[in-house]
Image (cartoon, rainbow, N blue to C red):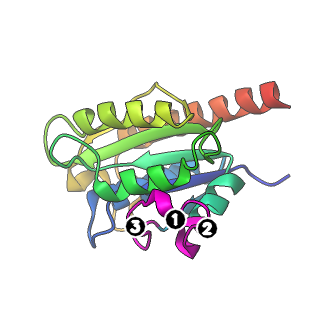
Amino acid sequence: MSKPVLAIVVGSVRDGSLNQRLARAIAHAAAEKFEARFLKIDDLPMYDQDLEADPPAPVKRLKSEITAADAVLCVTPEYNRSVTPLLKNAIDWASRPYGKGVWIGKVGAMAGATPGAIGTALAQDHLRAILAAVGIRLVSKPELYIAFKDELLDEDDKPAKEDFAKLLGSFVDAIHDAYQAHARVDA
């Protein structure tokens, strides 16, 4: 039997992004339970309701990839105490047209990393409201707000410390458990 698909959407695409690194670390931690697929969002045009009836090809691709996923993970940096425009734009496109968004009913989780002490807590607070509004069944515990330090990951973005590996494992387990519970209910 194939593994369920975990779609990973990262709100930062810059080289060396802490959140790209965190997302790869979570994908490594999830390898036994999920097939992780990173979704491309940096080619999406800005959301435009006039294009909903016939969305651009990158939007169709994104919606198809989310539809094919069993669960989703949004990984966000914190920009001005909120999520990035890149991530919000992807969420908006995939939520439209109203009532027909591809997020509806998906099990989802969120994570984020920053060099600061509060580790994206404020961005995730905003993201929680956004994800609930588009119909994601959000896993709320454990929360993953990472005050990022280089020693957390090795050169391949795998957890370098046992306690961090356990934390990521618990996070993945919670997503997988929620996916299995919802899959049984929806069957």
Q: Please name which of the two marks, 3 or 1, marks the residue nearer to the observer.
A: 1
List x then y, in percent, for residue 42.
39, 70
Front residue of 85 and 33? 85
Question: Please, what is the three-letter code of the amino acid marked with disc 3?
Answer: Asp
| Rendered view: 32 above or below 174 | below
Distance, label 3 to label 1, CA atoms, is 40 Å
Question: Please, what is the three-letter code of the amino acid marked with disc 1?
Answer: Leu
Q: Are marks 3 and 1 in contact (CB under 8 Å)?
A: no
Determine whether, in the image, residue 14 is placed left or right of residue 111: left
Dot 3 or dot 1, earlier in sequence: 1
- Other residues around mark 3 within 10 Å, as few (<14) / some (14–19) / many (≥20): few
Determine whether, in the image, residue 134 is placed left or right of residue 65: left
List x then y, in percent, for residue 21.
35, 60
Distance, label 2 to label 1, CA atoms, is 6 Å
Q: Which residue is mark 3?
A: 156
Q: Which residue is mark 1?
A: 51
- Name the disc covering residue 137, or none: none
Distance, label 2 to label 3, CA atoms, is 40 Å
Q: Which residues are magenta?
A: 41-61
Say if the magenta span includes residue 79.
no
- Name the disc covering residue 54, or none: 2
Q: Secondary structure at mark 1?
A: helix
Residue 53 picture quarter: bottom right
Main SS of residues in magenta: loop
Question: Please, what is the three-letter code of the amino acid marked with disc 2?
Answer: Asp
